[in-house]
Amino acid sequence: MKKAYRLKKNEEFQLVFKQGKSFANRQLVLYFLKKDNQSHYRVGLSVSKKIGNAVVRNQVKRYLRQAFLELDERIANCYDFIIIARKPAKDMGFEEVKKSLVHVLSKSKLLRK
């Protein structure tokens, strides 16, 4: 995932948290906010220390980034997304993480068929 497609700054995160909407399942929480002046979506990832050590947290983030890359064509543009991983995500493989992400995106009607 290109760095231009990532949310980094605290102000950007706070804006999505305060003004955006959210959907969740057991493994992930999705916050999203429509931004009309963007040509591509941006993603911010949050994986708490409660999930595990740095190795586990980085693995979960890599899985999420790769899942977004594979779903790139189907995801609605001009949105900012924040994905928060919950505890069950640490025990999941890549395919399970991707399936969970598809579920939460389709639940929020941001995934094209």
Image: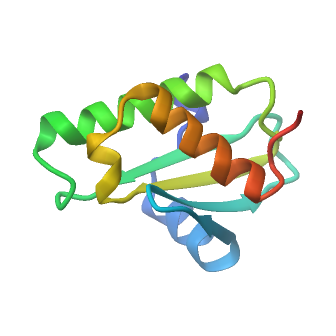
Provide residue 71's location: percent of width, then percent of height. 69, 27
Question: Residue 34 location, x and y as percent?
Answer: 80, 58
The residue at the point 83 percent across, 54 percent down is 109
Q: What residue is shown at x 14% (from left), y 40% (from top)?
A: 54
Rendering coords of residue 41 (x, y %): 72, 40
Point 70% across, 72% down: residue: 21
Q: Quadrant of the C terminus?
A: top right
Work out whether residue 17 or residue 89 is closer to the camera in this orientation and state it: 89
**Vertical order, 4 against 91 (above or below):** above
Task: Answer above or below: position of 60 versus 106.
Answer: above
Q: Quadrant of residue 100?
A: top right
Q: Image height check: is 29 above or below 81?
A: below
In screen coordinates, is 110 left or right of 17?
right
Query: Closer to the camera, 71 or 2?
Result: 71
Q: Position of residue 107 (x, y in %)?
A: 75, 57
Foreground residue among 63 and 100: 100
Residue drawn at the location 50% of the way across and 23% of the way down: 66
Residue placed farthest to the left in the image?
A: 53
Residue 113 shown left or right of residue 10 in the figure: right
Spot the residue most to the bottom. 18
**How many discs appear?**
0
Colour mode?
Answer: rainbow
